[in-house]
Amino acid sequence: MPVPNRCPFRTDGSDAVRGPLVFRIVPPAVSLTLSELESQIANRRPVDSPQRADIAESYAALRKLYADQSRRAQRQFADPRIKQPGAAALFHLAVESVKASRLVYTALQEADQAVRSGDMWVASPEVVERAIDWNRQKLDRLEGQLRILDLLDDVLPPLKKLSVQLEKSRHVSALGWQSIARHLLSEAGRAADGASILPLPGFSLRAYLAQAGHGFFGDAFSRGIETVLVLAPILASRDTESNEIDVLTIASLCQDSGLMLLARQRGAVGGKNVDGGDAHASVSAGLVAGIAEFAAQIPSLVAEHHRRLIGFDRVPDLATAVQKTGSRLLATTVRFLEIVDEMAWNAGEELPEAALYPAAIRLVNETGRGEWDPKIAAELLSGIGFQLRCEAVEESGEERFFGRTAFGIRRRDPGDPNLPDPNFLLVHEAPAERYVRPTSR
C-alpha cells in the first residue's frame, strides 16, 4: 500500500523516505505455548551440594510469588460471568491459567520433597519463574476482559434511557451522550496498553448483553461500544479538539442504533438478532439527528460509515465528494472488528488469542487492493499495538497501487439506488465544502 511522501505512522516527522511506500506489520513475538512450558518444567536436573542453598532460597521466593498469584486468580475465577454464554474466550483464559498454576504447584511440591530427602533433582527455578510470569500475563488479559464487562454493566442502563428519550423526541440534549462517550474513553485509557482493553476473539459483547437481559439494546450498541474501545488509544494520541472527539465517539456508539427501532417494528423478542440489512443505516442516521448540538455532524458520519464510501483522496478537478477522516477511521475500525469476529468464528473451539494478528494482515491486504485508506489503516493498527515498518515500492506507469487509478476513485460497495437517504430530523446544514481551483492572473 503505497503512502505518498512519507510513512503515515512516523512519530519523528522524518521525511527521509520519499515516494510511494508500502507498510508491513512486524510479526509479534511468539510466546510459549502451554505444552512447551510443560515440557520445560518436566525437564528435571540434578543440583550439586554447593548450589542447594541457593536453589532452596530461589524456590522460597517462587513460593511467595505463587501464593500471591493464586489469591489473585481465586478472586477472578469467582466471577460468575466467566462461564456465561458469549464469554467462551474468558473461560478459555481461566482454564489455561489453572493448568499453568498446577504445573507450578507440582514443581514447588517436588522441590520441597527434594530438599527434605536430599535428592536434588528439580526443575530449574528460571523455568518455574517463567511459568509464573506466563500465568501472570493470562490473568492480566482476563482482568482486562472483566473490566470490559464492568464497563458494559455501567453504561447500558443510562444508555437505554437516553436511547428511549432520543426515539421519542426530535430534539434532545447531547450532555448525556457526551458523558457516556467520555466515560468509555476514560475507562479504556486506564488500560496498561492499547490492546489489553480489546475484547478477545471469541468474546461476544452482543451475546453477553443478551444474556444480561438487555435484549435489542445489546444488538443496537454492542458493536458501537466495542468500536469506541478500539478507537480510544487512537483518539488519545491525536491532537484533536474535545468536540470533534465527542462527535466521532457518539457516532461510533450509535452506528447500529437503527437495529433497535427495526426490532420493535418487526416485533422481535429481546435477545434475538434482527437482520435489518442496509436499511438501519438510514434509520440510525435519522435517529441520531435528534441530538441537537451535533445534528449536522453525527448523522453523516453514521450514514457514510455504513455505505463505506472509499474516496480517501481529494480530486479538486473533478469536485468529487470524499469521506472525511473521521468517517474513514470509523469504517476501517468496524471492518477490522468484522474480520476478527469472522476469524474467531472459523477458529471454533481453538479461540486463538493471536487472532488479532491474522485479522490485521487481512486488513492490510484489503487496503492494498484499495478498499481502505492506507494512512488510516496504519494509524488504526499502530494504535492498537502493532508495530509497522515502511518499504519503498516502484510505481507502474500512471497507476499507483491504491486500488485506484487516474481515471477515478473506487468504492468498496456498489451504490444501491434502493437505499433511502437518511431522514435527518432538524438537521442544521453545515456549510458545503467547496473545491477552489487556483487561477493565474
Image: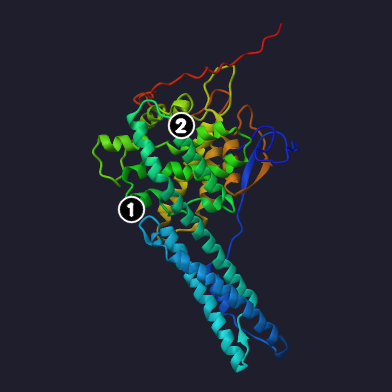
Please name the amino acid that badge 1 sits on.
Gln
Asked whether residue 124 appears in the rendered view, the answer is: no
Q: Quadrant of the N terminus?
A: top right
Residue 288: percent from left, percent from top: 41, 30
Which residue in the structure is indicated by mark 2? Answer: 174
- The single residue placed furthest to the right in the displayed view is 16
1 vs 2, front mark: 2
- Crowdedness of circle 2 by 10 Å Cα count: few (<14), some, many (20+)? some
Residue 118: percent from left, percent from top: 62, 93
- The single residue placed furthest to the top in the displayed view is 441
- Identify which residue, 74 or 2, lies in the foreground: 74
Please name the amino acid that badge 2 sits on.
Ala
Residue 391: percent from left, percent from top: 68, 42
Q: Marks 1/2: CA distance?
A: 29 Å
Position of residue 326 in the picture relative to residue 278 (left or right): right
- Identify which residue, 385 or 192, lies in the foreground: 192
Q: Residue at x 25, y 36 (%)?
A: 266
At numbered mark 2, what does the secondary structure look like: helix, strand or loop? Answer: loop
Residue 21: percent from left, percent from top: 66, 37
**Which of the 4 image quadrants contains residue 325?**
top right
Mark sitting on residue 211: 1
At numbered mark 1, what does the secondary structure look like: helix, strand or loop? Answer: helix
- Crowdedness of circle 1 by 10 Å Cα count: few (<14), some, many (20+)? some
